DNA sequence: ATCTTTTTCGCAAACGTTTTCGTGTTTATA
DNA sequence: TATAAACACGAAAACGTTTGCGAAAAAGAT
C-alpha cells in the first residue's frame, strides 16, 4: 500500500527544501533547470498530486459548492443536480449534496455542517417545512458570513440572494389556455396547499387564464391536496376526491400542478370510462418521466430542470470568482415550454 | 458581513493563547473554570464553529465519502444515493457526488479529483464504457493508496474491494418462474448486451428458469438491445423489434431486464390489441416509478436500491473507522423481491 | 518559611501547501 | 581585482486546528 507522496517526502528524498520542490513543480524560473528536471521526474514517478485539503486551507476556498435539496428521488431535482454538476465540473468545482428531506431541522443542520469551511457557496431549494415555518435565519446567517446562496424553484423574496425560477404563473396560464383553446369549458385544477410559492403561482395562472377567457371559476373544481402526508395514502384520498369531482360535475379538462396528480387523474378518468383526450383532456406540470411514458402520453409544462441547474451553478460560480461585493442579486425567470402529447390532442 | 470567527481571533480578543481557547472550548480540565466560562461565552456569542478544512488537514481524514455513479437522473441511482446519504449523515459523514455519465474518462478524472485528500473513501458503480474497456487501473490505484472502495450493482470481480449487489440471477429466475407458474409457455426476454454483468446474470436466470421447467429456449425470443445509443432512437427501434417479435410468434410472457424495456413492451402489446395480463404477461426488473403508475401496473423485481445504498455506506464507514488493514473484502448479495402488480395477475 | 504538589496556561509542532524575502554562490562588468 | 548583477535555493510565515509538554503561579504540606 503506497501512500500518497507529499512535497516533504520528495524534498527529503532528493535532498532539497520543500519550497524548492513546490517551485520546481510549478515550473518556477527560480529553480535551476537540472534540479527542476530531477524533481519533476521524481514527482511523476510517484504520481504526486497536491493535497486538496491543504490547498483549500491555504487559499481559503474549497472549489466545492454545496447543494441542499428536499429530495433526491425525484426527477426534477435529480435533473437540476445533473445540470449543476455539469457546469460545476467544467469550471473545476465539485458538488456536495445535502438532503433536507423536506425537514427544517435537517436543512439547518446540513447547512451548518457544510458552512464551516467545507464549501464556497450554496445552491438550494427550500424545504416545505421551512416554507411553512417561514424561518429563514439559516439563510441570512450564511449570507452574512459571506457565503453566497443561489435559490432555485422554491424561493422566498425575503432573502437577498440570486434566484432561479421557472415562470410558474405564465406556464400555468398557457397550459389552461391550451385546454380552453381545445374546447374545454369546465376545467378542474389539482394543486397543493398554498404555502409553497410554486403551488400558489400555478393556481394564480389557472385563475387568470379562466378570467381572461371569461370563464367563471368554480371553487368546486379546485382540489387542494395536502401533500404533507408523505405516504401513499394521500394519493388514494386524492383518487377518491377526483372521482367525486368527476362524477358530480362534467369536467372536460384537468390541469394538475405536478406529474403525479396528473397521472392519478388519468387513472381515475380511465376507471370512469372517460376517454382521454376525447372526453377529458389533461395537462401536468413537470419534466418527469411518467408523462412521457404514460398512455396516453401526457401533455406537460416543462420546467427545464437541467437548465435551471446549469444557470444556478453559473450564477454561484460567477459570484464566487468575481471579487466584487455580492450586493446585486439577480432573479432569473426561465420561460416554460408546453410539450404537447396525446392527452390534449 | 461578519466573517466566521477563528480561535486566533478569540484568543486575541480575550487575551489568552490559541491553545487555551481550543482547550477551553473542548472543556479541558487544564483550563481554569473562570477563563473557560469567559471563552465559551465569547465563542457562543460569536457563533464559533471549528473550520472543517483545518480539522481535515490535521486529522488526515475528511469525514466525506465520494460517490461516483454513471447517471443521476435515474430512479435506481438516486434511490441508492438517498440510502447512502441517510446512513452517512447519521454517522457524521458528508457525501460528495461525481457523475461519470457512463464515460470512462469522466470516471477517471472524477476519481482523481476527489482522491487527493477530498474524501476518505469511494462508493461507486462502474460506467458502461469502463466495463467495455475493462480498464480498472483507477480502482486499483485508489485502493493501493489506501483509499477504500465499495462497489455496488455494477461490479467486477478483479478488484479487491467490498461489493454490494442484488441477486440478479436469482431474481430473474424467480421472475420467469412466476410467468411460467401463471401458465406462460412462450416467454420472451428483453435484455441488454452482455458486457454489463447485470444483464448477463439476468439472462442467465431467464435461461435457467426455462431449463428447470423443461422449456426449450428459443433464441428468437431473446432481444438484445444496444443501449449505448443514449438517444431515444434505440427505444423506437426496440419498439419495432418487439412488434416484429410479437407478430411472428405467439409470445404470452415477457421478462424485461429494466423498467423502460418493460414499459415499451406494454406499449407495443397495447398497440397490437393484446390485453395485459390476459393475453400476455409482463415483468420488469427495477425499483422505478414507472412500473407503479403504469396501467396496468407492472409487476417487477425490486432491487432494494435504497437498502443497497445504506449497506454500501455502512461498509465503507465501518472500514474507514476500523484500524485494521483493509484486507478482507465482503460480497453482499441482497435478495430480490417480486412485487406483484396487475401485469401478471 | 521552605518545599512539594496542584492548578492554569503558553509554546511549539504537526497536517501539506504556496509565496515572500533573504542569502549565498556564481557569473559578468568595469 | 573589486564590484555589481544574475542565479539557485532555503527559511519562515500563513491558512486553522489539536495536543504533549514545560513552566509559572498558586495552593498545600511540613
Image (spheres, coloured by chain):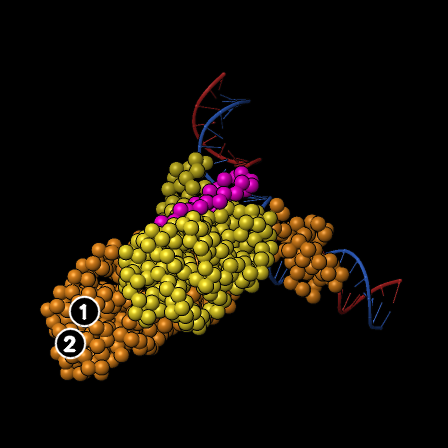
Chain colours: A yellow, B orange, C red, D blue
Residue A62 in the image: state x and y as whole percent.
49, 50
The mark nearer the N terminus, 1 or 2, is: 2
Find the residue positioned furthest to the left. Answer: B248
Q: Give the image quarter of residue A36.
A: top left
Closer to the camera, B61 or A161? Answer: A161
Which residue is found at the position 30% from the left and 62% from the top? A279
Decide if residue B272 is on the left or right side of residue B170.
left
**On the image, numbered disc 1 is attached to which residue?**
B273
Q: Inspect this view and state whether residue A230 appears.
A: yes
Decide if residue B31 is on the left or right side of residue A205.
right
Which residue is found at the position 39% from the left and 65% from the top? A249
Closer to the camera, A321 or A172? Answer: A172
**On the image, numbered disc 2 is attached to which residue?**
B186
What's drawn in magenta, residue-wise? A309-338
Q: Inspect this view and state whether residue B326 appears.
A: no
Residue B7 in the image: state x and y as whole percent.
64, 53
User: In which chain is the residue bearing label 2?
Assistant: B
Quadrant where the C terminus of chain A sits is bottom left
Amino acid at each position: 500500500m503506497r501512500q500518497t507522496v507529499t512535497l516533504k517526502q520528495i524534498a527529503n528524498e532528493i535532498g532539497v527544501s520543500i519550497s524548492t520542490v513546490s517551485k520546481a513543480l510549478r515550473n518556477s524560473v527560480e529553480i535551476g533547470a537540472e534540479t527542476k528536471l530531477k524533481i519533476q521526474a521524481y514527482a511523476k514517478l510517484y504520481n504526486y498530486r497536491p493535497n486538496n485539503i491543504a490547498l483549500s486551507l491555504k487559499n481559503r476556498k474549497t472549489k466545492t459548492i454545496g447543494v441542499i435539496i428536499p429530495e433526491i428521488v425525484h426527477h426534477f431535482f435529480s435533473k437540476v443536480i445533473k445540470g449543476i454538476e455539469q457546469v460545476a465540473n467544467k469550471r473545476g468545482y465539485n458538488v456536495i449534496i445535502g438532503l433536507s428531506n423536506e425537514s427544517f431541522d435537517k436543512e439547518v443542520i446540513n447547512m451548518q455542517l457544510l458552512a464551516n469551511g467545507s464549501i464556497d457557496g450554496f445552491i438550494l431549494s427550500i424545504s416545505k417545512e421551512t416554507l411553512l415555518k417561514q424561518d429563514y435565519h439559516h439563510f441570512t446567517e450564511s449570507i452574512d458570513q459571506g457565503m453566497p446562496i443561489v435559490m432555485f424553484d422554491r424561493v422566498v423574496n425575503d432573502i437577498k440572494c440570486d434566484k432561479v425560477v421557472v415562470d410558474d404563473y405564465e406556464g400555468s396560464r398557457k397550459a389552461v389556455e391550451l385546454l380552453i383553446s381545445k374546447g374545454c369549458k369546465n376545467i378542474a385544477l389539482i394543486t397543493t396547499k398554498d404555502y409553497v410559492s410554486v403551488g400558489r403561482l400555478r393556481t394564480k395562472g389557472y385563475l387568470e387564464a379562466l378570467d381572461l377567457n371569461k370563464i367563471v371559476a368554480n371553487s368546486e373544481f379546485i382540489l387542494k391536496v395536502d401533500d404533507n402526508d408523505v405516504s401513499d395514502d394521500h394519493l388514494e384520498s386524492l383518487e377518491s376526491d377526483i372521482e367525486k369531482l368527476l362524477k358530480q360535475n362534467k369536467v372536460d379538462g384537468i390541469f394538475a400542478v405536478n406529474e403525479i396528480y396528473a397521472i392519478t387523474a388519468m387513472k381515475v378518468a380511465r376507471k370512469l370510462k372517460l376517454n382521454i383526450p376525447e372526453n377529458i383532456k389533461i395537462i401536468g406540470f413537470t419534466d418527469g418521466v411518467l408523462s412521457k411514458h404514460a398512455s396516453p402520453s401526457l401533455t406537460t409544462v416543462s420546467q427545464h430542470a437541467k437548465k435551471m441547474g446549469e444557470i444556478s451553478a453559473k450564477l454561484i460560480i460567477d459570484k464566487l470568482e468575481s471579487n466584487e461585493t455580492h450586493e446585486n442579486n439577480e432573479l432569473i425567470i426561465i420561460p416554460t415550454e408546453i410539450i404537447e402529447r396525446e392527452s390534449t390532442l
